[in-house]
């Protein structure tokens, strides 16, 4: 139970976020052939954490409404063009539409008197606006107080956020009959579908307040109504933030378990179950889990069609009738399937209310319609159909950030924050580890969870900041704001970027020494690094050669530098950098190392006379270039190849190498920061690095891959807590290196295996270099600093 609770809270923290919808758009898409339909179906199945399908893929030429976040607009547009999908913009800016529709939302209840001037009962609800849960509960309490012989308000349990859930029983107690059939109604199972609670409260009001107009509906039937099934402001969410996440187990949620138990108490007498949703104007029968039809489907269909015919006669609205799977899509775990298949209620329906998609969840208030009073010609069956068209509107409420707590200024809805958190016990460490392993598409771990009382740096997007803080408080995790405005720090750091190269000819400084494109007083982009390599190779052709060993996905050169005075039989050292694009200090250090070995050869000839050096300064050139681009992302980590079937781009190269690949510490989610690529060496860049290392592996004794940050000197293994058999030799050499480094610069480095010092991380280049390529001394070096600046280390700190 403790594990399940932990799991649910973590997932809720990742998805139940407070957010705005600035820049989001709703696109209506239509598949014109089978391949394009399959593309949309795959997007729905695998990427609902990103693309919010307001309607789901059903069939060819059936329009689908998809809300697209601004960060994925370009990717989505490319997908539309690539797969020749017909489309149009329905809503250009969702937030603007929400703001316009806010006039439809009622103000908080302040009126306490029960009657209007005319003497008729006046309630908190007026059915010309949309009301919050508190107001709905006040209305139910008032109605139960005013009509105690008809209305009973029943508490059925508490929600995850400790709100009471209510069932309303409506029955004529003066005509008590324990054999009466019952109708069960619910709504609000999907929070943004405001139409459902609005209709349910109207139905309750109509049955009770206007009882005299149609007494047969209470004299002959009992009504059990759950007006709001999902009352929480946050609520539970799930794996990958998918909109259709089913929870870790059946009835894992407090709300569904409460509803189940309440329904089972009255199921024996209940003949009809109605669950209100929106939108699309469809009347659905079981089954949703299979294309097979229930044995009594003709009876289910006939009753639904009769209701729809009556509804159309009153309002002219058209509803389609059919099974969930046959009319829409496969959807297992739905309430109507359980109601019919397990609770035994014969007539179970889901009704998706207005409209057909022009407004979707943002229907204007003018479409709200209240039904006329029940007429004498309406039968017991058709009253059900009339009930469905009371209110035809829904859209999503937008909770705002709550109190700021002890973090200082109120949380911004636009700024990224970096928090330093410190787990104080095993449970809080497990929380952070789960967030790292399962929610790296939301929370960007600048450093990973290691052990108790070891700080972890996490960049949190604005939409999740409040939720993140609540999670830290829930599990008593110490936290503080390390960087309050990541964008401001990035802008401040732009002064450290070197100006573009404007001349290519080799030149001399006033002192007569060669002057190169790089000066190591600023960070240089990829063209400047390539220019430097060309310049140095031209200046020292007998000492240094630069070879293009391949090209990246986007066609950038992958360069190999060889530094050697010639001869045979020499041992070699292989160095690479820039595997993670945002770690600018890595290519800066590696190019400085090349410069030092070549330009200052005379000061230490033994390093080149006795050793050959093979160096690849930037092995993720696409990602590195993207971090410098005007429209790029300074904090981009991965490669830049699109992932098939996903809108998310890139693979973590340092989880893509083929030695014990995908055995822990990497993500299978394409949107995750540690995404392993789906297969070993799936990326062209890691393939090129692999083949280049293998070409010189027989003479190579040492492999160094340079990263940041944290000041660690790490040995294999990363995939397991076990030590290599020669760990003593690996450790001894690392100690000697770190001692020399500390003596020179005063910096302190922690030594140990990746897993035991940091965390499990399979598919790393250092593990493969030792276990796959056979290089005995393989190390990952995490350069400065220990976290004050993180990836925004000021220029001038390239040396160890």
Image (cartoon, rainbow, N blue to C red):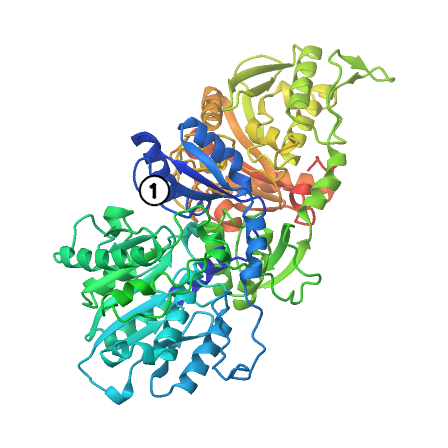
Question: Quadrant location of residue 149?
Answer: bottom left
- Read off the residue under disc 1: 57
Question: Quadrant location of residue 113?
Answer: bottom right
Question: Quadrant location of residue 388?
Answer: bottom left
Is residue 459 among what the camera can see? no
* For residue 238, side relative to residue 501 (left or right): left
Image quadrant containing the N terminus: bottom left
Percent across and percent down for residue 140 are 43, 78
Instruction: Give whichever of 689, 69 is nearer the camera.
Output: 69
Percent across and percent down for residue 136 are 46, 73
- 57 to 3, vertically: above or below: above
Crowding near the residue tagged with mark 1, few <14, some 14–19, many ≥20 C-alpha atoms within 10 Å: many
Image quadrant containing the C terminus: top right
Residue at 44% over, 34% down: 87
Residue at 43% over, 66% down: 198
Instruction: Give whichever of 703, 675 is nearer the camera.
Output: 675
Q: Outermost residue, left direction? A: 295
């Amino acid at each position: 139970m403790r594990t399940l609770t932990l799991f649910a809270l973590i997932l809720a923290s990742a998805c139940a976020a407070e957010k705005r919808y600035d820049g989001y758009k709703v696109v209506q898409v239509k598949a014109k052939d089978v391949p394009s339909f399959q593309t949309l179906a795959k997007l729905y199945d695998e990427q609902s954490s990103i693309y919010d399908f307001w309607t789901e893929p059903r069939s060819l030429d059936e329009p689908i409404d998809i809300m697209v976040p601004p960060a994925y607009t370009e990717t989505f547009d490319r997908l539309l063009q690539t797969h020749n999908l017909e489309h149009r913009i329905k809503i250009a800016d969702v937030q603007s539409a929400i703001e316009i529709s806010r006039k439809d939302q009622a103000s908080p209840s302040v009126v306490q008197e029960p009657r209007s001037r005319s003497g008729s009962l006046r309630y908190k609800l007026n059915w010309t606006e949309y009301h919050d849960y508190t107001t709905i509960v006040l209305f139910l309490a008032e109605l139960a107080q005013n009509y105690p012989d008809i209305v009973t308000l029943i508490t059925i349990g508490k929600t995850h956020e400790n709100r009471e859930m209510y069932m309303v029983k409506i029955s004529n107690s003066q005509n008590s009959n324990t054999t009466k059939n019952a109708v069960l109604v619910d709504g609000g199972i999907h929070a943004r579908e405001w139409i459902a609670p609005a209709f349910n409260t109207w139905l309750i009001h109509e049955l009770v307040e206007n009882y005299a107009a149609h007494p047969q509906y209470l004299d002959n039937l009992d009504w059990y109504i759950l007006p709001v099934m999902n009352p929480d402001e946050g609520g539970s969410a799930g794996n990958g933030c998918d909109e259709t996440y089913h929870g870790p187990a059946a009835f894992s949620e407090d709300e569904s378990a409460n509803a189940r138990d309440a329904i089972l108490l009255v199921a024996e007498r209940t003949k009809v179950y109605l669950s209100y949703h929106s939108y699309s104007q469809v009347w659905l029968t079981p089954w949703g889990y299979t294309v097979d039809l229930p044995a009594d489907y003709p009876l289910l269909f006939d009753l639904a069609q009769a209701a729809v015919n009556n509804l159309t006669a009153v309002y002219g609205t058209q509803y389609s009738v059919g099974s969930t799977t046959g009319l829409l899509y496969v959807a297992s775990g739905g309430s109507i399937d359980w109601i019919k298949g397990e609770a035994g209620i014969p007539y179970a329906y889901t009704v998706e209310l207005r409209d057909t998609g022009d407004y979707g969840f943002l229907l204007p208030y003018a479409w709200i319609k209240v039904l006329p009073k029940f007429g004498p010609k309406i039968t017991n069956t058709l009253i059900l159909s009339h009930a469905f068209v009371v209110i035809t509107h829904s859209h999503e409420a937008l909770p705002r950030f709550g109190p700021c707590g002890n973090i200082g200024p109120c949380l911004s809805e636009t700024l990224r924050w970096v928090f330093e958190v410190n787990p104080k016990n095993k449970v809080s460490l497990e929380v952070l580890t789960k967030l790292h392993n399962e929610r790296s598409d939301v929370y960007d771990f600048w450093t990973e969870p290691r052990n108790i009382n070891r700080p972890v740096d996490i960049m949190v997007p604005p939409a999740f900041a409040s939720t993140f803080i609540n999670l830290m408080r829930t599990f008593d995790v110490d936290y503080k704001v390390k960087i309050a405005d990541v964008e401001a720090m990035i802008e401040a750091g732009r002064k450290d970027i070197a100006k573009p190269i404007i001349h290519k000819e080799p030149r001399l400084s006033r002192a007569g020494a060669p002057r190169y494109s790089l000066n190591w007083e600023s960070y240089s982009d990829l063209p400047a690094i390539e220019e430097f390599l060309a310049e140095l190779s031209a200046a020292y052709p007998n000492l240094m050669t630069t070879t293009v060993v391949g090209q990246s996905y986007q066609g950038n050169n992958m360069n190999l530098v060889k530094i050697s005075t010639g001869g045979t039989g020499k041992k070699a050292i292989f160095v690479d950098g820039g595997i993670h694009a945002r770690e600018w200090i890595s290519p800066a250090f590696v190019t400085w190392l090349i410069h030092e070995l070549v330009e200052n050869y005379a000061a230490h000839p033994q390093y080149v006379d006795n050793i050959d050096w093979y160096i690849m300064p930037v092995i993720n050139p696409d990602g590195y270039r993207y971090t410098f681009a005007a429209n790029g992302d300074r904090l981009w980590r991965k490669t830049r190849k699109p992932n098939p079937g996903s809108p998310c781009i890139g693979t973590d190269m340092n989880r893509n190498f083929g030695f014990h690949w995908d055995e822990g510490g990497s993500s299978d989610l394409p949107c995750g920061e540690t995404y392993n690529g789906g297969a070993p060496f799936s990326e062209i860049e890691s393939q090129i690095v692999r083949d280049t290392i293998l070409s010189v592996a027989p003479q190579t004794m040492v492999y160094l891959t340079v990263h940041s940050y944290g000041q660690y000197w790490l040995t294999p293994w990363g995939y397991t807590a076990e030590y290599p058999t020669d760990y003593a030799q690996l450790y001894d050499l690392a100690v000697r290196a770190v001692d020399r480094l500390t003596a020179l610069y005063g910096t302190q480095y922690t030594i140990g295996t990746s897993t035991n010092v940091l965390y499990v991380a399979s598919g790393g280049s250092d593990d493969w270099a030792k276990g796959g390529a056979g290089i005995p001394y393989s190390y990952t070096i995490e350069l400065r600093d220990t976290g004050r600046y993180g990836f925004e280390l000021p220029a001038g700190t390239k040396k160890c």
